[in-house]
């Protein structure tokens, strides 16, 4: 089949079986083989190796519960980014199947609790919702989303642009899953102006607002002026939070190295001042990621910027439109074709003849205010 290496778990009769292929043997090593999963170690480079668990969950419930327990045991021995993907033969909610009569809340809760307890992130998908479709001789069809891809926060931070696509079913009742760890084409977007909550920690912000806002001109002009002024102030005065953090840490390292050789009162005072500045920067960094993550709470007051960074990455990945279903029912995945399709849709929408929307058509649609006496 054109691959240099492979590993397989044998099927038992017509049930189970996993076969994994790859090229460049120096980049992949087999860590664990199990009747329901295979774990590989991937070395894209020597600095950032990651783990990949290929799963084929048993259709039998008690064997599938064993999968959760044994995969958890192995997972705790793996330290680093982890991707888990395959056919789990289980759903999480009723919306994952079109046949509610066969849905079991008990079986789904086992799956959901395992995902939660292992801090896994569902990577979502592009394309058709259901990955498994079974059509019976009676003409009745059942569908479900049985195939998924999960990852931990470390893997998501390593591959923030990763995406999952459900491809068309051809030779199986399951749809193939295509997992891309990098975007197909680089997307360059202009960075819009955003008011940063971290600016409130700087007392100079209030003076900038007072001197820039002109009550004698209109609101829109004031907003444009304010955005331009704050952008310049952020760049030249407030500064990049991440750069400030690195600079303060570098100065602290130098001071502490010098004091280990020759202690000095002046250096001790400077160290304390820099420590205060460092804690202020940590708070600004937390506000920055809190705002970007769009979370509505901060847990325990901790400097949990890794959590907010992960939440932001997940939101951005899921907000990216990578596929649309056309009018003919075919999924469009090519970026150029997507742009053409969206442009044509809105051109048609805004160029449609709106003269048919008369008062008679709208009558009864909206409530009518009674006339005052």
Image: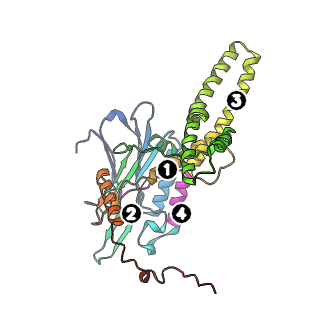
> Could you classify mark 2 by the number of other residues whose Cα lies within 10 Å: few (under 14), some (14-19), or many (20 or more)?
some
**Residue 237 at x, y percent in the picture:** 61, 33
Question: Which of marks 3 and 2 precedes in the sequence?
Answer: 2
Residue ID for mark 3: 275
Residue ID for mark 2: 129
Q: Which of marks 3 and 4 is in front?
A: 3
Question: Residue lying furthest left in this view?
Answer: 1
Separation (CA) of disc 3 from disc 4: 47 Å
Separation (CA) of disc 2 from disc 1: 19 Å
What label does residue 109 carry, if any? 4
Check residue 124 for magenta coloring.
yes
Question: Which of marks 1 and 4 precedes in the sequence?
Answer: 4
> Could you classify mark 3 by the number of other residues whose Cα lies within 10 Å: few (under 14), some (14-19), or many (20 or more)?
some
Separation (CA) of disc 2 from disc 3: 51 Å
**Residue 200 at x, y percent in the picture:** 66, 43
Specify start and end residues of the magenta stretch as a single range: 106-126
Quarter holding the N terminus?
top left
Residue ID for mark 1: 314
Separation (CA) of disc 3 from disc 1: 32 Å
Q: Choose top left, top right, bottom left or bottom right for residue 183.
A: top left
User: Can residue 231 be seen by looking at this rendering?
Assistant: yes
Q: Which of marks 4 and 2 is in front?
A: 2
Question: Which of marks 1 and 3 precedes in the sequence?
Answer: 3
Determine the residue positioned at 44% across, 62% down: 90
Q: Choose top left, top right, bottom left or bottom right for residue 319.
A: bottom left
Please tell me whether residue 77 is drawn above or below residue 125 in the rendered image: above
């Amino acid at each position: 089949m054109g691959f240099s290496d492979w590993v397989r778990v044998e099927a038992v009769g017509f049930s189970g079986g996993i076969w994994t292929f790859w090229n460049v043997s120096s980049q992949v090593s087999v860590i664990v083989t199990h009747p329901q999963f295979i774990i590989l170690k991937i070395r894209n480079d020597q600095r950032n190796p990651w783990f990949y668990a290929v799963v084929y969950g048993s259709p039998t419930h008690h064997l599938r519960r064993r999968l959760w327990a044994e995969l958890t045991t192995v997972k705790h021995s793996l330290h680093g980014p982890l991707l888990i993907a395959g056919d789990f033969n289980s759903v999480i909610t009723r919306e994952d199947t079109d046949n509610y009569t066969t849905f079991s809340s008990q079986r789904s809760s086992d799956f959901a609790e395992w995902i939660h307890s292992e801090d896994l992130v569902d990577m979502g998908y592009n394309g058709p919702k259901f990955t498994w479709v079974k059509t019976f001789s009676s003409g009745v069809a059942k569908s479900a989303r049985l195939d998924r891809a999960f990852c931990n926060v470390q893997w998501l931070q390593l591959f923030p642009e990763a995406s999952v696509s459900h491809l068309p079913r051809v030779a199986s009742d399951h749809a193939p899953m295509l997992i891309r760890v990098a975007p197909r084409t680089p997307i360059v977007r202009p960075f819009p102006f955003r008011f940063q909550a971290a600016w409130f920690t700087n007392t100079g912000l209030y003076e900038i607002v007072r001197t820039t806002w002109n009550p004698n001109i209109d609101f829109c002009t004031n907003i444009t002026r304010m955005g331009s002024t704050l952008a310049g102030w952020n760049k030249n005065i407030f500064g990049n939070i991440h750069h400030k953090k690195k600079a303060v840490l570098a100065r602290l390292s130098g001071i502490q190295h010098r004091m280990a050789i020759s202690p000095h009162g002046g250096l001790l005072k400077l160290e304390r001042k820099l420590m205060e500045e460092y804690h202020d920067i940590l708070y600004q960094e937390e506000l920055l990621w809190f705002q970007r993550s769009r979370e509505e709470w901060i847990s325990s007051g901790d400097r949990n910027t890794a959590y907010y960074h992960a939440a932001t990455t997940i939101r951005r990945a899921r907000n990216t439109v990578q596929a649309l279903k056309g009018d003919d029912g075919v999924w469009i995945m090519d970026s150029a074709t997507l742009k053409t399709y969206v442009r044509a849709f809105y051109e048609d929408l805004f160029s449609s003849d709106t003269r048919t929307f008369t008062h008679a058509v709208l009558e009864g649609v909206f409530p009518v205010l009674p006339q005052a006496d």
